[in-house]
Image (tube, helix red, strand yellow):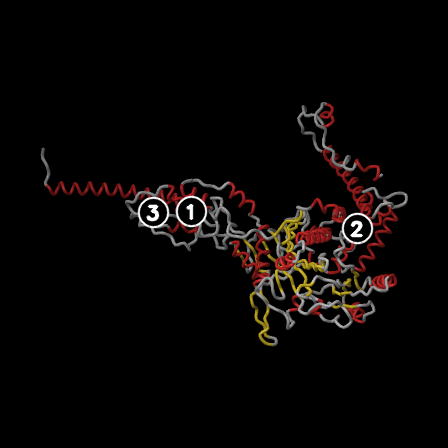
Amino acid sequence: MWRGSPERELAAGWEAAAAAEAAAAAEAAAAAAAAKSQAAEAEEQLGVDAGAAGEPERPAREEQPKAAGPAPARPRAAEEGDARVARRLPPAPPLAPPRPARALYQLTKTRGRSRGYRRGSGSLRPVTVDSSKARTSLDALKISLRQLRWKEFPFGRRLPCDIYWHGVSFHDNDILSGQVNKFPGMTEMVRKITLSRALRIMQNLFPEEYNFYPRSWILPDEFQLFVAQVRMVKDGDPSWKPTFIVKPDSGCQGDGIYLIKDPSDIRLTGTLQSRPAVVQEYICKPLLIDKLKFDIRLYVLLKSLDPLEIYIAKDGLSRFCTEPYQEPNPQNLHHAFMHLTNYSLNIHSGKFIHSDSASTGSKRTFSSILCKLSSKGVDIKKVWSDIISLVIKTVIALTPELKVFYQSDIPTGRPGPTCFQILGFDILLMKNLKPMLLEVNANPSMRIEHGYELSPGVFENIPSLVDEEVKVAVIRDTLRLMDPLKKKKEMQSQHPEKPFPGKEDLDCELTGDPESNPEAHLPSICLKQVFPKYAKQFNYLRLVDRMANLFIRFLGIKGTMKLGPTGFRTFIRNCKLSSSSLSMAAVDILYIDITRRWNSVTLDQRDSGMCLQAFIEAFFFLAQRKFKMLPLHEQVASLIDLCEYHLSLLDEKRLVCGRSRRPQSSPPQEMNPTTQSAAGSPAPRMTGANKLSHSRHALS
């Protein structure tokens, strides 16, 4: 056979080699393109949500066809955004085999951890918090958010946030979604006059249970009553030498507070002419430590109003006076550093001691006080039990009117935020260790530094380790309890998605993957639930809460806080409270008299009509008239039962009428309830008709 020249054979070999190389390059390019497509899909699943991270979404670029073979791959820097990973991966080497799927998964999983969350794999985006209105609590809030690894927006955000942190009130910002750390109406409810009225109602119903709040009078409205009652007690007991403390209604941080020995004190006359105030019996025998009077600031989280959820922080602050205590006498009544425990007052004393130790100085942790008392044989569990009882009873007294405020600002059916709030309870321990409520603060200070006076009038802010230890834990753990993604995180930790299980995942399960439990690095929650945990012990006190539900039912117009005459007449008629001895004309007179009196003493003149406090007074009048031989709380409970019974019958009647008007669309073989009962099937559940069968005789 003829064979060509060696040059011709060599050229043919080169051509064959070139063709084989070209075919291999084309195959490698196709494999690299497939691998790149898989990586892009994986990164799209595992990528960061640019909107939640505060970055605009970038449009994906279309892949351009490459004439040449792909270039070598380089590892991506950890700081780059995950959303850009698939677009920035350089092409693979020309002859390199494609990465196996497992290697691609591990690569994208590792790169996905560098930023906030992954969309497709089950990991969640970070919780977003708007802190633009946080004010004095901003520093503690920032530390808490860093510990939680949440996303803060200090200047607000166009898109909605999960949580809005306000510094003063619910109305600091217009919120239509998410959660906000203030309840509408809370600032008004814990003012000294409103708080005293709410607790007085409970003292009238349950005098023994609510003896933790000093006897109080509201000035100027009850000045004559105050003078008459003091004179009557002195006439009965000439040895009684009381001391009274006067607190302006709108005062804070000890402003305007002073002590008097007699109602005729000239300063009291000045208070009557200037601004409303509360005058209370002064607690003359407080518990002393190091011969100093002190009070306790406890932080209470109202997590939800309906259903009611209350948490108490396991630690608080103890604020000390700076002068040794003596019982009040005409010579020391004006010694504010001896009698008033307000931090904002005592910090100006030359004897105020700043300390980084939790157990020394003029501000200490409450836990250090308990340790000191325990070393002296005090039953600490009993002290805590009494404090928990005080907190629950106080919140129960506040919730009825808070519900009225809530439905006014966030009516049923309207989209709006859910609310929670941290309250500051100021409590004084008496010498016999009985806790007494001084006041409740809607906006307790969350500052974690104190002002140090370098020279007269020149101050420098110095970090306070005691404040930071207590307050940061309260804010951080409040956020943990309110975490809107908590349920999803729990479901993710219970059912994690692991598409490629292997040795690495087994190692993570054995050693504990921090991503499976994002709170693994945090201490245990410092907030303890006390309600509904102890609801069975305190639900009998919620009579006013049930009255508020009746009041809200008959308000009629959404957003209003006062009951009109038509609504009050409807309440009387639907609850069957009118009779021959109580005509509707008498009902109208009752409404006018009580409403006119309350409108003259309340500051809220936005709406005309009967406020909740006036409705409660009218309800007490009706209960005493109908059930004359019972104690007041039993009279009220019986009337509430009667009203709820008649309203449940009315609701059932409306439900039946509504069903009868609907077209019959049920199949012919389906039996009605009467037939079912006759045939032996379970009878329909009774709701209102048998609700109070055990007490029908008493209600009739």
Q: If you read the primary sequence from the N terminus, does the residue marked by circle 2 or circle 1 appear first? A: 1
Q: Which mark is residue 563?
A: none
Would residue 467 be visible to someone looking at this image?
Answer: yes
Q: If you read the primary sequence from the N terminus, does the residue marked by circle 2 or circle 3 appear first? A: 3
Q: Which mark is residue 205?
A: 2
Of tags 2 and 3, which is closer to the observer?
2
Q: Quadrant of residue 609?
A: bottom right
For label 1, the SS is: helix
In the displayed structure image, the side of residue 632 where residue 465 appears, left or right: left
Q: Which mark is residue 109?
A: 1
For label 2, the SS is: helix
The answer to whether residue 63 is above or below residue 223 is above
Would residue 170 be visible to someone looking at this image?
Answer: no
Q: Residue at x 59, y 71 (%)?
A: 452
Disc 3 residue type (three-letter) = Pro
- Residue sitting at the far right: 581
Q: Position of residue 462 (x, y in %)?
A: 56, 68
Identify the image quadrant of the N terminus: top left
Q: Tag 2: Cα neighbours inside 10 Å, few (<14), some, or many (≥20)?
A: many
For label 3, the SS is: loop
Disc 2 residue type (three-letter) = Leu
Q: Which residue is mark 3?
A: 65
Q: Tag 3: Cα neighbours inside 10 Å, few (<14), some, or many (≥20)?
A: few
